[in-house]
Image: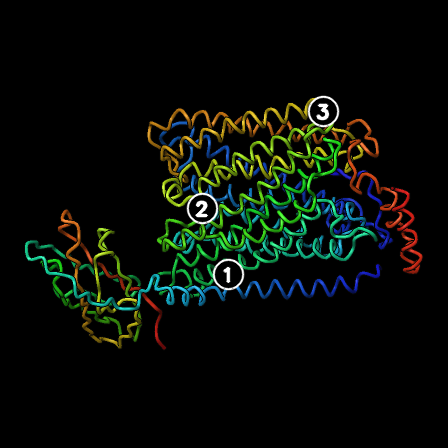
């Protein structure tokens, strides 16, 4: 064939290697993205909020917090010990949730939070939470988990009821 | 299907397959280019059928024809098929036909791989089309298949993922082939800075393809394992992050839109000098502008996701970087205009499509700059304004350039002339109906009509009806194009070997060289003898 075929094959090899490297680069973006967010302080779900000394308790207002709990794909029972509480904005609060494994198998899950109304995310400071953390429960095991938080007293006055919701998702059976 | 009448046998094989096997087994770059072009036209009709369905549903408020789920599948598959099935293969087809001829190479570097990269496409296309008929229907989460919608959904989504894998593999193989051909197989004397602009734009496009197509393959693989193998890259329930998907997807997706427009720039840069009878103005600045667009395209991806909640400094970076792309693009538009300036211009169909391209692409470019401005983008995100913007750059940009290229090179490919009068009809009908369809969508978007919804508020009714009428007209006009091409191939007037008197690139002037290289006995000659032949042939052309 043509005298160029050898350099063509060399070129093919280089470009194929480059493609494979780029495929791996796609995967490398995953830890890179996590690291970037951590360094830049964006989207830091696992880091607890720091208590702001300036938050004042607004004793003139009372807001209702509904504590919602759900389970998806797990043989677990999950509930808040109190379904709802009334607090003053700015007041530091601790609430308890309880999970119970109803099956005869060790299983693991993790909880994802959700807030309503959406603006609540800006005013909710959580110092301690069990969300985004793997929970492993032995058959029949019961565990109580606290959530410590404060609602910033800057929260708009028209918001009187808000919901903090957690959903436990399965992380698969533990062998 | 036989567009090619002057197939000079590639004499490496003494038993030429006949019938259908002649097409299945072919390694001739012209045959493969022809198949690419017909395939992309077929996919263009399928994607167009879906578009007709969308416009029919949106003709009036309320749900008349398509159930919402099916409507979503229509919009999703319309996007996927048009991007991966119609526009990209059409440009690869053009590259297959033109690149070897324009640089004086006998064929593509890897003829057998060329055949594979084409024959993967029909498999992927049938996966996409047949996914409509599986339980759960075709993917319906939009052509960008964002999770969580794409981590849900039925078997149709898995078929789509597999189709994207195949299309990606085909594109990567095609790109490797084109890069190797251009870098290693140019005729002696054809230095990089003497290459035709179409070849330059394709070289840069091919590099973008090998850069980002594997990243897309990685993304859909992550999606696949999230769906079927319990990983949690994008699944929030398992600790993944759906926003991560958007970052990785658009890291591929933004260079992808330049993959679809750079070869169009190349086509227009060939046609305009020909019909202005002047050399291209500012050739080297064109090359540098193309390269800078390609480089910039890799650092602007997050302008597709200004509303996901990113820090202001991030929004500003991506906003400025995006607006910077207007500079090299402006250089290009300036050069095309300057090429026409005081040229002895004639307005044959390829030229009309090129001028239409410049005119409408600039409108699409301007609305792109509007979308780049963060506060405006937050307003128009997910509205018809964005739809109008990207159809102005993809339909009147990429597609018009493909039409122009087909009219321009059809005499070369088929040896016959197309019907100039019908071609002009095709152009003016395209122009009219395209603008009727998409210009009003700017207004719809600014008024707040969301995309990907089968129903809309009554206030949008009139503009939607106008847009639908335009859409039907545009769709029907393409049947005229099919007729023109078939008529040209079957009964067009014999074309002169140099049908456009302004054409100066090798494919018009180097017929002899090309034939000589293809001659079988040449391969048995020693290298030095062959070099002498090639040099002689080039001199003959000058």
Q: Which mark is residue B221?
A: 1
State the residue at coordinates (57%, 63%): A22
Q: How crowded is the residue under tag 2: few (<14 C-alpha within 10 Å), some, or many (20+)?
A: some
Are there few (<14), some (14-19), or many (20+) residues within 10 Å of tag 1?
some
Q: Which residue is mark 3?
A: B420
Earlier in the chain: of badge 1 and badge 3, it is: 1
Image quadrant occupied by the N terminus of chain B: top right
> x, y percentage for residue B104?
81, 48
Determine whether B64 is above or below B421 in the image.
Answer: below
Q: Are discs 1 and 2 located on one and the same chain?
A: yes
Is mark 1 in CB contact (under 8 Å) with mark 2? no
Q: Is residue B191 above or below residue B357?
A: below
From mark 2 to mark 3, how far is it between C-alphas? 39 Å
Query: Where does residue B15 sit, x and y in percent of width and height?
Result: 85, 52
**Residue B48 picture location, percent across and down:** 55, 35
Snapshot quadrant of residue B540: top right
Discs 2 and 3 share one subunit: yes
Q: Secondary structure at mark 2?
A: loop
Q: Tell which subunit mark 3 falls on.
A: B
A157 is higher (above) or lower (below) than A170: above
In the picture of the structure, the residue carrying the numbered disc 2 is B142
| Residue B322 relative to residue B445: left or right | right
Q: Nearer the N terminus, badge 2 or badge 3?
A: 2
Report the number of numbered marks: 3
Report the Cα–Cα distance between label 1 and label 3: 48 Å
- In this rendering, position of residue B159 left or right of residue A20: left
Q: Nearer the viewer, residue B321 or B244?
A: B321
């Amino acid at each position: 064939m043509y005298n160029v075929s050898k350099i063509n094959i060399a070129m093919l090899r280089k470009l194929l290697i480059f493609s494979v490297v780029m495929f791996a680069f796609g995967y490398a973006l995953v830890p890179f993205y996590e690291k970037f967010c951590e360094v830049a302080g964006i989207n830091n779900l696992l880091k607890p909020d720091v208590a702001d000394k300036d938050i004042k308790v607004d004793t003139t207002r009372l807001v209702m917090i509904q504590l919602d709990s759900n389970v998806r794909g797990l043989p677990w029972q999950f509930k808040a010990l109190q379904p709802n509480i009334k607090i003053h904005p700015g007041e530091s609060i601790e609430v308890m949730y309880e999970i119970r494994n109803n099956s005869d198998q060790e299983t693991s899950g993790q909880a994802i939070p959700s807030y309503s109304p959406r603006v609540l995310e800006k005013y909710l400071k959580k110092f301690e939470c069990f969300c985004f953390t793997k929970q492993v429960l032995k058959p029949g095991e019961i565990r109580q988990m606290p959530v410590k938080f404060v609602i910033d007293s800057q929260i708009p006055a028209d918001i009187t009821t808000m919901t903090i919701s957690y959903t436990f998702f399965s992380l698969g059976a533990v062998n | 299907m036989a567009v090619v009448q002057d197939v000079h046998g590639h004499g490496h094989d003494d038993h030429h397959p006949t019938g259908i096997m002649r097409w299945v087994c072919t390694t001739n770059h012209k045959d493969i280019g022809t198949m690419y072009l017909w395939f992309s036209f077929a996919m263009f009709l399928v994607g167009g059928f879906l578009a007709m369905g969308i416009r029919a549903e949106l003709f009036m408020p309320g749900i008349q024809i398509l159930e919402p789920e099916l409507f979503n599948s229509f919009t999703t598959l319309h996007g996927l098929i048009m991007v991966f099935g119609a526009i990209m293969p059409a440009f690869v087809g053009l590259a297959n036909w033109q690149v070897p001829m324009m640089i004086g190479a006998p064929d593509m570097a890897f003829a057998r791989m060329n055949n594979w990269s084409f024959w993967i496409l029909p498999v992927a296309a049938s996966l996409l089309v047949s996914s409509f008929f599986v339980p759960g229907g075709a993917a319906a989460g939009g052509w960008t298949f964002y999770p969580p919608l794409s981590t849900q959904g039925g078997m149709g989504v898995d078929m789509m993922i597999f189709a994207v894998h195949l299309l990606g593999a085909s594109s990567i193989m095609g790109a490797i082939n084109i890069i190797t051909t251009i870098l290693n197989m140019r005729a002696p004397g054809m230095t990089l800075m003497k290459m035709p602009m179409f070849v330059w734009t394709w070289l840069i496009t091919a590099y973008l393809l090998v850069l980002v197509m594997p990243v897309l393959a990685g993304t859909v693989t992550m999606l696949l394992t999230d769906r079927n193998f319990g990983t949690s890259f994008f699944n929030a329930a398992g600790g993944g992050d759906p926003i991560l998907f958007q970052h990785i997807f658009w890291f591929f997706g933004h260079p992808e839109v330049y993959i679809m427009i750079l070869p169009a720039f190349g086509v227009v840069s060939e046609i305009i000098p020909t019909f202005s009878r002047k050399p291209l103005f500012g050739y080297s600045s064109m090359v540098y502008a193309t390269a800078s667009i390609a480089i910039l395209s890799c650092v602007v991806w997050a302008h597709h996701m200004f509303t996901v909640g990113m820090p202001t400094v991030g929004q500003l970076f991506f906003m400025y970087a995006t607006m910077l792309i207007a500079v090299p693009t402006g250089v290009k538009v300036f050069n095309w205009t300057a090429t026409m300036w005081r040229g002895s211009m004639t307005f044959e169909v390829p030229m009309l499509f090129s001028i239409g391209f410049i005119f409408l692409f600039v409108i699409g470019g301007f609305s792109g700059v509007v979308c780049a401005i963060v506060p405006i983008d937050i307003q128009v995100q997910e509205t018809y304004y964005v739809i109008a913007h990207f159809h102005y750059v993809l339909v009147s940009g990429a597609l018009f350039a493909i039409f122009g290229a087909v009219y321009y090179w059809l005499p070369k490919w088929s040896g016959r002339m197309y019907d100039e009068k019908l071609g002009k009809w095709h152009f003016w009908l395209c122009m009219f109906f395209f603008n009727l369809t998409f210009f009003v969508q700017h207004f719809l978007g600014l008024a707040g009509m969301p995309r990907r919804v089968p129903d809309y508020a009554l206030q949008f009714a009139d503009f939607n009806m106008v847009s639908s009428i335009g859409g039907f007209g545009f769709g029907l006009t393409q049947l005229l194009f099919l007729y023109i091409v078939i008529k040209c191939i079957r009964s067009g007037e014999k074309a002169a070997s140099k049908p456009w008197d302004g054409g100066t690139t090798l494919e018009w002037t180097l017929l002899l060289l090309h034939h000589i290289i293809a001659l079988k006995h040449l391969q048995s000659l020693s290298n030095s003898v062959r070099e002498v032949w090639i040099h002689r042939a080039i001199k003959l052309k000058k």
